[in-house]
Image: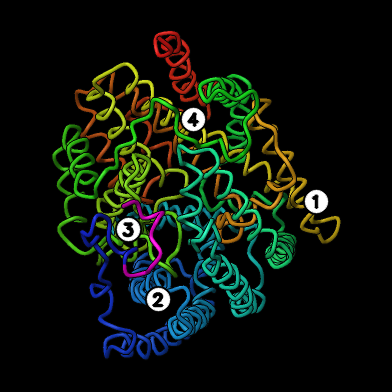
Amino acid sequence: MSSTNLDSEKSLNKIDKVPLPRWDLGDLYEARDSKKLSEDIRLLDKVCEEFENKYQSKIETNKDAEFLYQSLQEYESIELRKNRIISYAYLLHQTNLNDPVISKFFGDSVARFKSWEAKLVFFENQLSQIPEATLKVMLENSTDLERYGHYLASCQKFKPHVLSLELEKYSKDSSILKSSWLRLFDTTISSIKCQVGNKALTLEQTLAMLQSGKRKKRKRAFNALSNEFEERSTIFALITNTLVKGKEVDDSWRKFPSPQSSRHLHNEIEDKVVEALQESVVNSYPDISHRFYQLKSQLLGLKKMQYWDRVAPLPMAPQNKVPWDKAVETVENAYSAFSPQFASLARQFFDNPWIDVPVMEGKSGGGFCHPTVADAHPYILLNYQERTRDVMVLAHELGHGVHQVLARDKGEILSRTSLTLAETASVFGEMLTFESLLEKATSPRERFALIAEKLDDMINTVIRQMSFYEFETRLHYQRREGELTPGDIGKIWLETQTECLGPAFRFNEDYNSFWSYIPHFIHVPFYVYAYSFGQLLSLTLFGIYKEQSEGFEQKYLALLKAGGSRPYHEVLEPFGIDITKPGFWNIGLKVIKNYIDQLEEMYPEILD
């Protein structure tokens, strides 16, 4: 039985009566009240204060490379311990969003984390203030310090945006208020129960119903979602208005020229590169999303599609369910065909309790891979419901996991990959799995259905995510003119989605509130373009792999192992890729267009 039809939390943990894997966070801490956790909290209280007393006001004026290297080593040790605590608290909370005791534990952990950060905030600020010439000499004369070269260069780029130490500390201390708004969003989302017929379903289950082959069922799910979002629209609008205004204030103090600029700087990407990406994707709307959805409306026998038809399966799509063990086998085989080492690293996630698989009440929706800390391992959260699309989500998140495992030898500071390159392995893993399924297709209809479903996902990842970026951009600029009502936000949403999805759709006002459940707008503003960036970059890399497979594996693994230790242009250079070149993004977009071409060519044959 599909998990979308289950009523109880007990049965949500099983599909076909086979228990699905749950993660065990014991590799971080045994429990909330563990002795080790208490000891680490006390130790951090002590060492953060000692670090502040030892190094504050001494970093930017010191010319001793050994002194700077020692400070970085101590800072990295502190980061490792505090990130372990917040990772544990966050992951525990993500599967227990409705538990007030665990929510309190998470909130208290965030408060402690912010207090430690307030004591450490001086460090990166002072790293940014080291004179460029002084830093250059120190790096040239110290092989130990050279390891941190890219990190130090990244800190230097924030120099124009650093506040006084007193203001930086205030910013860290007061950020607990932002965290409270984030928690309000999470708990509001997790509390949603959609009444569909005589069943009360979770948000994740109801969203999954939009992929039902029965149009009436999809419409019921859409109406239930719309009702729940509309009922909470005032809360969602208040959260959004507050956080967007808070970001505007912070950006103003830090002299960022646009709402997006801070994200680009954190992503280590130039504004002009993102602008070129945005322009390329938006210009492709007519030839990709508009064309695909026109074809899909014909295949569904509809003159106009409604929003609840967007991710509907095609009539020829296979209806068979994919059990968890089959999904594991499919992804493992696809990874293994590319690289035994890649597959071996992925296997660890199945051999150990590192993945939380089932749909559960009080569990965060969607899927993610959390890197935790460099001396532990990542954890993956899924909401597996036996669909081919869920297999792709597994392949995607497992790609993240392998990437993070490969990079952890770089240490806590240097293993963190910027968001733009962080999507590289995940999308590549998806493509490996998709190509594997495509090769095994036994009929033109099956092949057609697989390509169509993949296009649904690609358009979600590349085209629609960029329309989300457009939505955020307009939202943040319009918020500067004053507070926005739910209707104001809904109008921006409808405009950007109509532009993106095209004339194949007829939208009504019930769709206006569907912006409200997307967590990226709240948790990580302007994150979404990283999906478009990662997908198009990965499609280019995948094309290189298909054309020149010899030697590709080692170059690709080296890219992943680099983590955040090198700038993007250096890690991409061995592949002959330069993303700053005009027209680069059109290479990946052309791959998507070619898939649509294939569908249009196969269409007459499918009708026979």
Q: Residues within 10 Å of mark 1 (few under 14, many from 20)?
A: some
Q: Are marks 3 and 2 in contact (CB under 8 Å)?
A: no
Q: Residue at image x 44%, y 84%? A: 105
Q: Is residue 101 visible?
A: yes
List the single residue furthest toward the front: 198
Q: Residue at image x 50%, y 76%? A: 117
What kind of element bears circle 2?
Answer: helix
Disc 4 versus disc 2: distance between alpha carbons?
A: 38 Å
What kind of element bears circle 4?
Answer: loop
Where does label 3 land, which residue? Answer: 380
Where does label 2 land, which residue? Answer: 89
Along the horizontal axis of the image, is 197 left or right of 418?
Answer: right
Which amino acid, by three-letter code, is at mark 2?
Ala
Q: Nearer the viewer, residue 100 or 410?
A: 100
Is residue 92 part of the magenta span, yes or no? no
- In the rendered structure, find residue 579 and report the number of the disc placed on it: 4
Q: Are marks 4 and 3 in contact (CB under 8 Å)?
A: no
Which amino acid, by three-letter code, is at mark 4?
Ile
- In the rendered structure, find residue 478 and report the number of the disc placed on it: 1
Is residue 5 part of the magenta span, yes or no? yes
Q: Which range is magenta? A: 1-10
Q: Nearer the viewer, residue 137 or 115?
A: 115
Eye-nearest disc, 3 or 1:
3
Residue 277 sits above or below residue 295 on the image: below
Residue 357 % position (x, y) = 30, 58
Eye-nearest disc, 4 or 1:
1
Disc 4 versus disc 1: distance between alpha carbons?
A: 31 Å
Disc 3 versus disc 1: distance between alpha carbons?
A: 36 Å
Residue 402 sits above or below residue 279 on the image: below
Eye-nearest disc, 4 or 3:
3
Q: Residue at image x 59%, y 29%? A: 281
- In the rendered structure, find residue 166 and report the number of the disc placed on it: none
